[in-house]
Amino acid sequence: MNQLTLPSLQVAESTNSNWLNIFCVGIVQASMGAVVVTTTTTLNRVMVIELGLPAVVSGFLVSLHYIIQIVRPRLGYGADQTKRCTPWIVGGMGVLTLGGVLAALATTWMAENFALGLMTALIAYCMIGIGVSACGTPLLVLLSKGVGDQQRATAATSVWIMMIFGFAVTSIISGKLLDPFSFDRLVMVSVGVSALAMTLSTLSVIGLESRLLRNYYTRHAPIADVAVPTSARDEAPSSKNFKQTLALLWRDEQARLFTFFVFTSMFAYSAQDLILEPFAGLIYRYTPGQTTQLSGTLHASVLVGMLLLAFIGSRWANGRLGRVSTWMSWGCVLSALGMLGLSSAGLISDNFYLVPLTPILLILGVGNGLFSIAAISTMMRLATETLKVNSSSANVSIQPGIRMGLFGAAQALAFGLGGIIGTASSDLSMRLMGDAGWAYSSVFALEAVIFVCAAWIARRVQRIETEM
């Protein structure tokens, strides 16, 4: 067994080294986001506008890449068994980038042969979902292991901001390169984005796993001259198969409740996304430019909430503002208040000026940012802490990959269903009620109730944490 002997004074890597590792993880996350955003925005627009296809076609394909991510627990279990995350990250990015290029080709083929293009697109979007799962799940496991308790919120915020930055940069540059539009340009831009994403992510993971694992073993062996494995391969493998391991994990009350929390909160979060701008246009009579600015206000508020949570979880706050996990529930409560504000705006649609949208969206966005980063930080902690589930004869250790996969699958499934059910509910309410204001109000009120349920589940997760 390869071992590394730690001197007594080496209890952690330098702060600069930690931030370098977080930056490398952020590059990989941003690279994944760059490929995904091209398929979910640019290709979505081309299908609807340039090809004149029903919006349900692109909507189904986008939802498909989320729903296929239910394979995350299985892929996380596979990473646990191989005891290596880097091959899964690089391999997953390869599948993702190939899927991105194939999706662009499928879109161009739809113009000539819709059936062939659609079948190719189904394969491509499945590849995208599998690639994101295979790359993202072990990547978050590594990040979870590589940072300490007081750095998790800051690390999660940093990585997610880099991902958002990747979204923005890719959208701006791709948009400029696509003018004047042609299908050949579309394929060339997709190939360029995928090639750059693959290159940057591969370079970023060189040596990353060994550095992050060294941090992990150093924190868990802070005594003099402790021999620790240089690789996770030196750990004892699990003797349980995938189904048995997943069943054992599901017995843990905290992991089970947190999975429900992730699904519930992210479902409400995603359901609001596709109906906010139509609501502002129909009820508040906003122009397309104004609704875009409104979405910008919401996203900026989410960023404020993320940064606020990063400060709450930092060593400067030092726990004075409560545990990070506490803010999962408070963030959901704020989000529920924001949704109730939008609901009240729909009820008085004839006097919409009485309820300005900007303050409501500030509350909603800050709440979204707080609970999302608090959830990611808690997810990282639950994935890597020592978790023992009592089996019939002995305590069996549950590895972090399958745990992170379970939480990630709940999030992806919530996003996939949230967009579909959110838009379908608004359409159905409008048909039943015959009034747009009341229809949107009812959907927003339902989302507020879901956020309250998520806050209640988060409190139960926190209660178990304090009892441990």
Image (cartoon, rainbow, N blue to C red):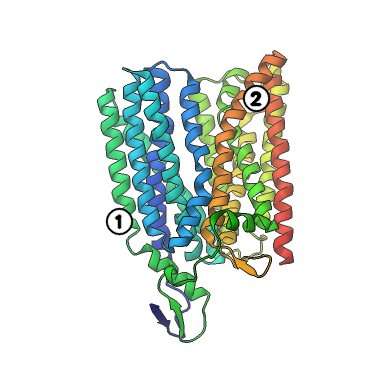
SS assignment at label 1:
helix
Question: What's the residue at 30%, 56% (across, down)?
Answer: 203
Vertical placement of residue 377 versus 353, above or below: below
Question: On the image, numbered disc 1 is attached to which residue?
Answer: 203
Question: What's the residue at 41%, 15% (across, down)?
Answer: 52
Q: Between 118 and 460, which is closer to the camera in this rendering?
A: 118
- Residue 4 position, x and y percent, is 40, 79
- Near mark 1 (Cα within 10 A), the count class, few <14, some 14-19 or many ≥20, is some
Marks 2/1: CA–CA distance: 44 Å
Residue 240 appears in which quarter of the rendering? Answer: bottom right
The answer to whether residue 10 is left or right of residue 255 is left
Find the residue positioned furthest to the top: 434
Question: On the image, numbered disc 2 is attached to which residue?
Answer: 425
**Is residue 138 something one can see in this rendering?**
yes
Tag 2: residue type? Answer: Ser
Tag 1: residue type? Answer: Leu
